Amino acid sequence: MGTRNVLASIKKDIESHVGDKVTLKANGGRRKTFVNKGTIEKAYPSIFVIRLEDDTQRKVTYSYSDVLTKTVQLDFVL
């Protein structure tokens, strides 16, 4: 399976979970990992947006390739 097909699969999976809650694990560089809870707010052609549930209610954006390279890991909350 080529990288393009894998990215399309990741994108389709995330698009199907828009509005769902997730646990986000993101590599912050220098051996730092951030863990937050949030909601997938929107999915665009090359990025997706997550609204964090912390005090700031800020939004973060990631690309689908971040998921592919495991820079970002999403665990869907059931």
Image (spheres, rainbow, N blue to C red):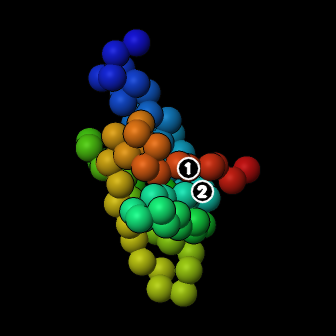
Q: Is any part of residue 13 visible from this angle? A: yes
Q: Is any part of residue 50 visible from this angle? A: no
Going from N to C along the chain, the mark reached first, 1 or 2, is 2
The single residue placed furthest to the bottom in the displayed view is 55
Amino acid type, label 2: Val
> Residue 20: percent from the left, percent from the top?
58, 54
> Residue 12: percent from the left, percent from the top?
43, 33
Q: Quadrant of residue 8 in the image?
A: top left
Q: Is residue 30 above or below residue 12?
A: below
Amino acid type, label 1: Leu
> Residue 27: percent from the left, percent from the top?
45, 58
Q: Which mark is residue 2?
A: none
Residue at image x 58%, y 66%? 35
The single residue placed furthest to the top in the displayed view is 1
Q: Is residue 62 above or below residue 70?
A: below
Residue that mark 1 sits on:
74
Residue that mark 2 sits on:
22
Q: Is residue 76 left or right of residue 31?
A: right
Residue at disc 1, secondary structure:
strand
Which quadrant of the rendered structure holds the N terminus?
top left
Which of these two is toward me, 25 or 59? 25
Residue at disc 2, secondary structure:
strand
Which of these two is toward me, 65 or 20? 65
Bin the neighbour count of mark 1 within 10 Å (Cα to Cα): few under 14, some 14-19, many 20 and up. Answer: some
Residue at image x 26%, y 42%? 45
